[in-house]
Amino acid sequence: MRLRVLLAIVCAGMGLFAALVLAAALWFAGGAPDRAPGGLVLWAGVLALAGAAALAYLLLHRRIARPVAELVVQAHSLANTGAGPVLAAPEGHALDDLPGSLGALSRELVAARRQIVQAMAAESARGETRQAWLEAVLLALGEGVIACNLNHEILLYNQAAQRILKQPGGLGLGRPLFGLISRAPVLHALERLEHHPPVGPGIAPGRVTLPLACAVVDGGALLDGRLTPIFEDGARMTGYVLNFADISRDLEEFARRDGLLRAATEELHAPLGKLRDDAETLAAEPDLAGEQRQHLARAIRDNSAELSAALERLDAERRALPGGRWPMAEVHSADLVAGIARHLAERAGIEVTMTGIPLWLYCDGQALMLAIEALVERLSEHSGVKAFDVEPVHAGHRISIDIAWAGEPVPDRVFDAWLADPIEDAPGCDSIGEALDLHGSQAHCRQSRPGRATLHVPVPAASEPAREPGHDELPPRPEFYDFDLLGRGGIPGGVPGEAQGEGLGAAPGALGARPLREIDFVVFDTETTGLKPSEGDEMIAIAGARVVNGRVLSGEIFERLIDPGRPIPKASIRFHGITEEMVRGQPSAREVLPQFQAFVGAAVLVAHNAAFDMKFLKLKEAAAGVAFDGPVLDTLLLSVLLHGDAPDHSLDAIAERLEIEIEGRHTALGDALATAAIFARQLGLLEARGIETLDQALSASGGMMEIRRRQAQF
């Protein structure tokens, strides 16, 4: 700055000096060069100008340049030290409010730095406290804890893990997990997470825990464990934590007590057999003397009563004895069957089709999966069949895993021999029969219909979750029909007598003449922000399930959340449980509907209260660049046709009439699967009424539509 000021003064001085020289030259040119006063005046002016310039430079240097230099030094010190000094205003400055403003800014900077230092110190202390708490908790835990990355390398463990595994040499940071415990159960749990992540309404990713049973690699212990995935940014799994306890002693004691009691009860069968023989002798020799006969009968009665009472008492005590319990967990049948299908397809080229509505089981998923895989492989070898259907079916308080195939049932003696066959990678179970015994399963094979057999494997059903307070039964979605669409042939079947050459009521001739069981159907459902599609309500979810040959292919489903681009009313959230946070960032209907159309393909659409769902699709067709212009069947209208005297044709009422359990009510996928199961049952009822082709079903639906339209006028 000093240099710039000096240059400015020099330039100004040179300009004034040039002006004086020019004035002097003109004066001399006027003929008075010998006038001494003129020269003196000229040099006096030059000296005055030089003095003024020097004075101006000194003032600028003292009042501006030097204070600015002092501020620069202070600022540099503040920027390159810790807390640093606060900027002070230089003495005698002419910088107006600049030093004061810089001083206030420096005070705020110093205060902020002190706060940061204090916060870092406090956070460091809290971190040390948390670390001390974590170390204390891990030390006090009776369960073993091991954290691993997805390469199954150990990142953390506690002393309980060392004690339970009894392999201090193999347990260490960075060491492989599978050098300590069996590989298959852990990979099975991770596979379930990979192929069917249990994330949905009310389930946070970081709160998912999968139980598992595994063994120490040297066979010295059986472990009851839990696997909890670790998610990064709430979405990407980066590792997992294993909690486990040694249950070997519990299981051994339980097996020993159970074996002793079982032997005791079996020993009672011999005397009971003798008593039975005496009773048969008594019945075979009616000529025995009266006294002998009475004595024999009394002895038989007394001994039988005593032995029966003892047998019942021992059996009751055996069941009531405390002891170890094999670890079971709630497992979704869709996860179980999907794993079976993948493994059998890869290993044996066997096609397993998942049918029916998925249900929740209470089982050892690993052991049950391996047992069913082994049974299906043996069924395939015995019958030569390579395609099986697997469907969970309610059977009282249990669920039967039904394995169906085209062929004859397996003889009991052959099936009983299979139960002794060994299976691998199922801790605690050496054979198929032992795996089934864990679940109290008495599997049996029967002929379901001519040319088709079914193996029934009953397993415990998961208990229904308790209903949360305030979550009372929700009313069904009101029946909805857009009668303007009806008049254009835009709803299933159209109206008898009206043209059906366009719109949803039209079925191509070849398709319309085909039997219903030979047509592929996609049963779908939507969840929406409200019940008024023409007034701005939008879809927030859509799901569909395929029905082929009268079977619900629960393995072929479509499910998407949709961002409606508008708020979701609380009254609607109460029905479907979908919040604005869940749909934020999801694709719009314009992006989802082309995907849904690709899933549907050439299949015929089916829905319950179809006009409601189809109205939402039709309103989005232009924006999405798609057209759903094929025929559509409505299970509500088919119910009116099949059970016209029934007062209620809601989804729940129809499901109850047809004895169908609904899982996941008021979700798009749950309702779509329930509607698919209803439609599969309705196909048989339609055939019984002589309605066998798509044209006949559409015509009948159109008649029911006309009836509903007329009823709506009253």
Image: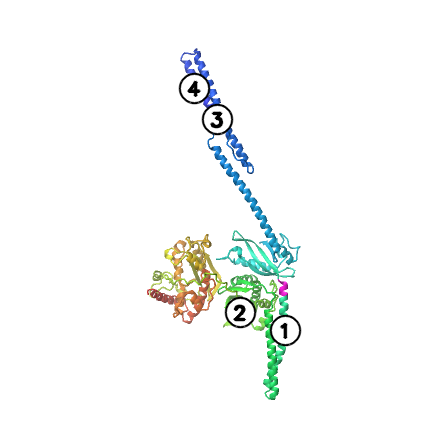
Q: Which residue is mark 1?
A: 264
Q: Give the label on residue 366, or none.
A: none
Q: Nearer the viewer, mark 1 or mark 4?
A: 1
Amino acid type, mark 1: Ala
Q: Earlier in the sequence, mark 1 or mark 4?
A: 4
Q: Residues within 10 Å of mark 1 (few under 14, many from 20)?
A: some
Residue drawn at 50 percent across, 35 percent down: 103
Q: Nearer the viewer, mark 4 or mark 3?
A: 3
Magenta span includes 215: no
Q: Nearer the viewer, mark 1 or mark 3?
A: 1
Mark 4–mark 2 Cα distance, whole angstroms, equals 119 Å
Residue 124 visible, this orientation: yes
Residue drawn at 61 percent across, 84 percent down: 296
x, y percent for residue 505? 37, 63
Amino acid type, mark 2: His
Q: Give the label on residue 5, or none.
A: 3
Q: Which residues are the magenta region?
A: 247-252
| Observer-nearest of 302 and 343 | 302
